[in-house]
């Protein structure tokens, strides 16, 4: 298999007339003087979209951080389109903003938004709000729309209809336009391409990797401008995360409900009347002395009201979901005009709100997703005169790394950092949560390689190499550790709980809930050195096994039978050449969750070691590493 290059697909000769054309093809007549100029990365984003849709009608995503000028990219694409264009947004502020950028070119477009009091749909380009368009679908019947642009597309629950629920609003609009025109191009834009509980919203990334599931509505991310690059090039202010010194809330016991969000009742349990709140706000006020604008993100309405009580009188405003829109606008105006220094809010000012002077963000709530965390901090990264950086105070111990959004799992613990792990099969440099010892990766949480490789039909598909896996007993295929059926032969995979239950029933079987594993060198009956591995449980019961590592064949057997599953950083190619090396590098090894032994004659034999256990039995409280 070969690595797929990161180039977007080249146009196919028979792909029909392009719906978008590059700027060089534009008649010079339309080059209006004084039109906005695109920054290099905006230009690049536009070009990638044009190239993608020349060769494909698969829905695509462009990822641009907050503050990177998404509206201008949309405007340029709308300008370049040959057919009609519908640009959807979920709030009227965005509809207005996108429309204004387009008209800055000296062109005219329609607005279809009841909230803005305009329901026009006759011009080539229409900027609409989702709610207004869905209520007047018959106005978008002609089949001449060739491009649908969805702003803030991470909000879009597309494809929900497939799971037996009623199709989402966005899905209905897409279906409607597609019914009239099968080759409709759908482009999504977002700063945070993830959905709560679902992960990445697109399947393939232009850097040659896989992100979301194959069933994701958006097939490709054709362009992404990383936040880190935006900061480095000076387009955004650098965030500086300070360790909250005085106190912090402990949200670690909270779990999200089925909706993926924390409940107000649970949040209030932690924050309401907490002795931490006044101390925290005192610290925020201390830092604020040097700052121009402060945004405080509270956990609940009650929490926010308490916070208001500790802030200097007349300098703070509070916005919640219940604040009347007139009051809300007045408060935002006061904040932007710096008549208010502090703006406290509860989950409402995460998108579409813009006050470039904000240079201190205090987070007093847990954030359920990296996307939400990025959106919150994004409020403080707009450049402004005299602004050097944006301070970030996190009092909630949020586990997200602003700069590592390529990993959409929460950080497993505070010692973990993004580590690079090369795939032994295709060479792709994966980034997973993990731990390092100097330059050496000693642990990572990657399961499957995210690299894209070319299959026999020359399509780019996800590399099949798995770092951690469950072996199918029928066909030997490697499956995800959580898989229930084998991807190779379709057989049901044997469940760890079935194994444990069966062993617990047998008189000649012993099950250890492993709380520790010991490695040592012993001599066998003939005086030859052997690696002895002893597993023990919380009650002191043990099982042991021995391995020889003298010859290459013995070592090969040891790697396959034992080492591969015990590596904390699988797939990085560590192959100890001697027993001494195993003992010296034992920090690279992990203990299994359970060990099952069977009695053979007078002795106990280890039959099975269970790793990555997720089932109904309790694991040992703290399995110590060897
Ligand atoms: Zn690979
Ligand atoms: Zn199988």
Image (cartoon, grey):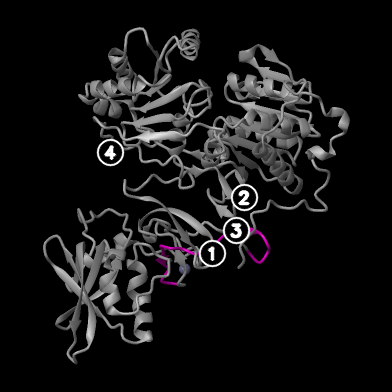
Q: Residue at x 63, y 43 (%)?
A: 223
Q: Residue at x 72, y 21 (%)?
A: 104
Ranked by sequence position, the earlier of labels 4 and 2 is 2
Is label 3 or label 1 in front? 1
Ranked by sequence position, the earlier of labels 2 and 1 is 2
Q: Could you say whether the residue bearing mark 1 is in a helix, strand or loop? A: loop
User: Marks 4 and 3, how far apart in space?
Assistant: 37 Å
Asked if ligand 1 lies within 8 A of label 1, the reply is yes
Q: Which mark is residue 461?
A: 3
Q: Are marks 3 and 1 in contact (CB under 8 Å)?
A: no
Q: Are marks 4 and 3 in contact (CB under 8 Å)?
A: no
User: Marks 1 and 4, how far apart in space?
Assistant: 37 Å
User: Marks 4 and 2, how far apart in space?
Assistant: 36 Å
Kindly identify which residue carries mark 1: 427
Task: Please state the horizontal and vertical placement of residue 237, each as a whole percent of the image.
Answer: 50, 31
Residue sticking out furthest to the left: 539
User: Marks 2 and 1, how far apart in space?
Assistant: 16 Å
Crowd around label 1: few <14 · some 14–19 · many ≥20 (10 Å): some
Task: Please state the horizontal and vertical placement of residue 582, each as a whole percent of the image.
Answer: 29, 73
Q: Residue at x 39, y 31 (%)?
A: 392
Q: Residue at x 38, y 35 (%)?
A: 241
Kindly identify which residue carries mark 4: 252
Q: Main secondary structure of the magenta part?
A: loop
């Amino acid at each position: 298999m070969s690595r797929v290059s990161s180039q977007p697909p080249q146009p196919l000769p028979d792909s029909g007339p392009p719906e978008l054309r590059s700027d060089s093809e534009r008649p010079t007549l339309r080059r209006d003087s004084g039109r906005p100029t695109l920054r290099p990365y905006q230009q690049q984003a536009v070009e990638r979209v044009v190239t993608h849709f020349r060769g494909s009608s698969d829905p695509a995503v462009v990822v641009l951080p907050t503050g990177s000028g998404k509206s201008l990219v949309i405007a340029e694409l709308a300008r370049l389109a040959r057919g009609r264009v519908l640009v959807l947004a979920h709030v009227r502020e965005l509809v207005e903003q996108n429309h204004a950028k387009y008209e800055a070119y000296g062109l005219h477009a329609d607005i279809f938004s009841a909230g803005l009091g305009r329901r026009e749909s006759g011009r080539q380009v229409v900027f609409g709000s989702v709610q207004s368009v869905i209520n007047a679908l018959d106005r978008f019947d002609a089949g001449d729309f060739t491009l649908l642009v969805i702003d803030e597309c991470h909000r879009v629950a597309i494809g929900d209809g497939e799971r037996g629920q009623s199709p989402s609003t966005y899905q209905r609009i897409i279906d409607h336009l597609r019914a009239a025109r099968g080759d409709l191009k759908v482009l999504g834009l977002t700063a945070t391409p993830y959905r709560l509980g679902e992960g990445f919203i697109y399947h393939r990334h232009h850097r040659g990797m896989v992100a979301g599931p194959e069933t994701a509505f958006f097939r490709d991310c054709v362009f992404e401008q990383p936040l880190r690059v935006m900061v480095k090039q000076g387009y955004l202010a650098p965030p500086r995360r300070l360790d909250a010194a005085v106190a912090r809330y402990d949200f670690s016991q909270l779990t999200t409900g089925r909706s993926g969000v924390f409940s107000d009742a649970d949040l209030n349990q932690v924050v309401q009347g907490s002795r931490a709140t006044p101390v925290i706000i005192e610290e925020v006020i201390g830092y604020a002395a040097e700052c121009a604008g402060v945004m405080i993100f509270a956990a609940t309405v009650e929490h926010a009201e308490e916070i208001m009580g500790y802030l200097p009188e007349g300098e703070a405003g509070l916005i919640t979901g219940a604040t009347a829109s007139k009051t809300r606008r007045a408060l935002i105006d006061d904040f932007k005009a710096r008549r208010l220094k502090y703006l406290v809010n509860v989950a409402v000012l995460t998108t579409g709100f813009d006050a470039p002077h904000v240079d201190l963000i205090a987070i007093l709530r847990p954030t359920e997703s990296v996307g939400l965390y990025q959106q919150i901090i994004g409020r403080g990264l707009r450049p402004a005169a005299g602004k050097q950086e944006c301070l970030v105070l996190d009092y909630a111990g949020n586990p997200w790394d602003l700069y590592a959004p390529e990993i959409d799992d929460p950080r497993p613990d505070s010692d973990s950092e993004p580590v690079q792990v090369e795939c032994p099969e295709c060479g792709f440099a994966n980034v997973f949560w993990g731990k390092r010892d100097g330059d050496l990766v000693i642990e990572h949480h990657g399961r499957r390689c995210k690299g894209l490789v070319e299959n026999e039909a020359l399509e780019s598909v996800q590399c099949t190499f798995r770092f951690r896996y469950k072996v199918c007993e029928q066909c030997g295929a490697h499956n995800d550790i959580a898989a229930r059926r084998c991807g190779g032969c379709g057989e049901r995979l044997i469940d760890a709980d079935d194994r444990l239950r069966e062993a617990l029933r047998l008189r000649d079987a012993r099950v250890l809930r492993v709380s520790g594993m010991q490695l040592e060198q012993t001599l066998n009956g003939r005086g030859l050195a052997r690696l002895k591995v002893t597993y023990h449980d919380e009650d002191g019961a043990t099982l042991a096994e021995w391995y020889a590592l003298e010859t290459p064949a013995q070592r090969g057997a040891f790697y396959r039978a034992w080492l591969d599953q015990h590596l904390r950083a699988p797939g990085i190619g560590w192959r100890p050449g001697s027993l001494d090396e195993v003992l010296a590098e034992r920090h690279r090894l992990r203990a299994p969750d359970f060990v099952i032994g069977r009695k053979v004659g007078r002795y106990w034999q280890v039959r099975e070691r269970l790793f990555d256990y997720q089932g109904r039995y309790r694991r040992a409280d703290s399995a110590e590493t060897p």
